């Protein structure tokens, strides 16, 4: 999905946040489910060509970010952050490999 207008862009982010928040809340305490929720979020966000910085903001930096809204335990927060970092590193790695080919 490419977001043509700022409205569509905001709508996409709002929808993605809602879905991800619901998945994370539901996954409460379940490591595999939390990882899936983050992975799903990450894939959709990168497929929509969101900037990495924006993806990070939506998940865990903004005041109304997904992680704040989910009211997670520290353990769950760590799982989400670790999963996200791993996905980002994979993405950067892939990007570097594509550039060097």
Image (cartoon, grey):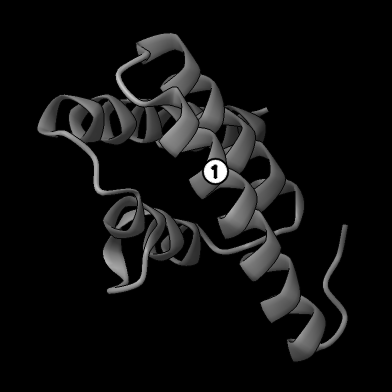
In what quadrant of the picture does the C terminus appear?
Answer: top right
Q: What residue is pinned by disc 1?
A: 22
Q: Quadrant of residue 9?
A: bottom right
Residue 59: percent from left, percent from top: 41, 54
Residue 87: percent from left, percent from top: 46, 30
Residue 30: percent from left, percent from top: 37, 14
- Residue that protrudes farthest toward the bottom in the picture: 6
Q: Quadrant of residue 99?
A: top right
Within-10-Å neighbours for mark 1: few <14, some 14–19, many 20+ = some
| Above or below: residue 32 compared with residue 61 | above
Residue 64: percent from left, percent from top: 35, 71
Which residue is found at the position 38% from the left and 65% from the top?
57
Which residue is found at the position 82% from the left and 73% from the top?
3
Which sits in the foreground, 80 or 90?
80
Which sits in the foreground, 46 or 69?
69
| Above or below: residue 34 compared with residue 14 | above
Which residue is found at the position 71% from the left and 59% from the top?
49
In what quadrant of the picture does the N terminus appear?
Answer: bottom right
| Above or below: residue 80 compared with residue 42 | above
């Amino acid at each position: 999905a490419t977001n043509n207008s700022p409205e569509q862009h905001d709508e996409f982010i709002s929808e993605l946040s809602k879905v991800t928040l619901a998945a994370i809340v539901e996954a409460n305490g379940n490591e595999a489910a939390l990882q899936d929720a983050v992975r799903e979020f990450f894939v959709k966000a990168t497929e929509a060509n969101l900037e990495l910085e924006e993806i990070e903001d939506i998940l865990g930096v903004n005041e109304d970010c997904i992680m704040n809204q989910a009211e997670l335990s520290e353990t769950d927060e760590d799982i989400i952050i670790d999963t996200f970092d791993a996905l980002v590193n994979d993405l950067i790695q892939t990007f570097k490999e594509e550039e060097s080919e």
